[in-house]
Image: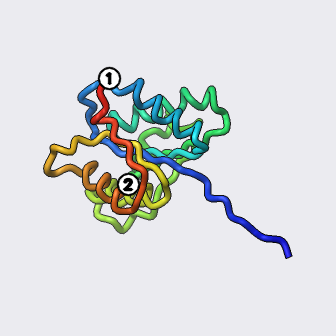
Amino acid sequence: MGLITTVKIMKTTFIGHRILLKNIDECLEKAIEKQIKCGCLSFIVGSHGQFDELVLKVLRKLKTIYKQIQIEVVITSLGKIKKFHEYVPYSDVKTLMYEIEDIFFKRRITYSNKKMIDECDTLICYVDNNLSNSGAKSIMKYAEKKGLNVINLFDIEN
């Protein structure tokens, strides 16, 4: 009898504040490229705010170099999909939506963020630890409790 082994595919996700307070383009690209060089080929990102937009921009750029990477964008609103009916901003990447119809609309992003964390090994984030009440901070803490490798770009000086 042959031995059957399962290889777990590394996956990285991203969480951050809606508004970026400093330029993190270069350190974000370096962090993602480091993940790729360590064997991560699968990335999942949200679709809200400046951080998510920057992550997707950098991932698309890196996909021109590393063709094998897979990019998924999580959608949290059917209205967002319908609004882009003529312009499809995610036509070059896979999109997904978790089962959130029964979740109160103000909790859908948090719920989706937790689902993203549950699928991943690493979190690259942009979180100010000094904020007392932040959805991004609570999700980062959730990732830490789950044992993910957490890379916080907010603390990295450029």
Residue at the location (46% across, 29% down)? 29
Specify the amino acid type for callout 1: Asn
Left-right relation of 85 to 101: right
Q: Quadrant of the N terminus?
A: bottom right
- Secondary structure under tag 2 reads helix
On the image, the x and y values in percent for residue 11 come to 53, 50
Q: In this rendering, which labeled residue sits more in front, label 2 or label 1?
A: 1
Q: Nearer the viewer, residue 57 or 6?
A: 6
Crowding at mark 1 (Cα within 10 Å: few <14, some 14-19, many 20+): few
Specify the amino acid type for callout 2: Asn
Residue at the location (49% across, 55% down)? 120
Q: Which mark is residue 113?
A: 2
As displayed, is residue 102 above or below residue 109?
below
Left-right relation of 124 to 94: left
Label 2 vs 1, first from the N-terminus: 2
Q: Quadrant of the C terminus?
A: top left
Q: Which residue is mark 1?
A: 158
On the image, the x and y values in percent for residue 26 come to 41, 24
**Disc 2 and disc 1 in contact, CB within 8 angstroms:** no
